[in-house]
Amino acid sequence: MSVFKDLFTSDVGLMSAAVIAITLGMGAFYVRYFLRHIASDSAAAAQKLR
């Protein structure tokens, strides 16, 4: 439990938590972005083939 205490009470720990949160947020954004564009490109290609 001292790990969590250090993570949320020290300056270095708070910066580490912020970097982890930003990295996870960026990962979620890019997954959503890529999946959305893959779907739209697939739909455009399917429509073009018709």
Image: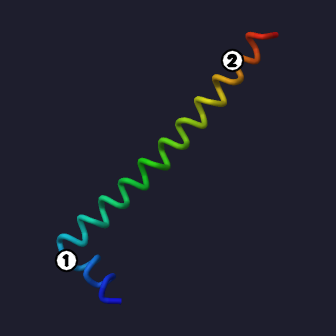
Give the numbered dot on residue 23. Answer: none
Where's the C terminus, which quadrant? Answer: top right
Quadrant including the N terminus: bottom left
Classed neighbour count for the residue bearing mark 2: other residues with Cα under 10 Å, few (<14), some (14–19), many (≥20):
few
Up/down of 10 relative to 36, above or below: below
Q: Name the residue located 28 percent from the left edge and 77 percent from the top edge.
A: 8
Q: Are marks 1 and 2 in contact (CB under 8 Å)?
A: no
Side of 44 relative to 1 (left or right): right
- Residue visible at 25% across and 81% down in the picture: 6
Residue 31, horizontal then vertical, whole percent: 53, 43
Residue position marked by numbered label 1 in the rendering: 10
Q: Position of residue 42 (x, y in %)?
A: 69, 24
Mark 1 vs mark 2: which is more N-terminal? 1
On the image, the x and y values in percent for residue 23 come to: 38, 53
Q: Quadrant of residue 3?
A: bottom left
Q: How far from the left and from the top, in percent, is residue 19?
A: 30, 58
- The residues tagged by marks 1 and 2 sit, at their Cα atoms, a distance apart of 51 Å
Q: Residue furthest left?
A: 11
Residue ID at (29%, 84%): 5
Which numbered circle lies on residue 44?
2
What amino acid is labelled 2 in the image?
A: Ala
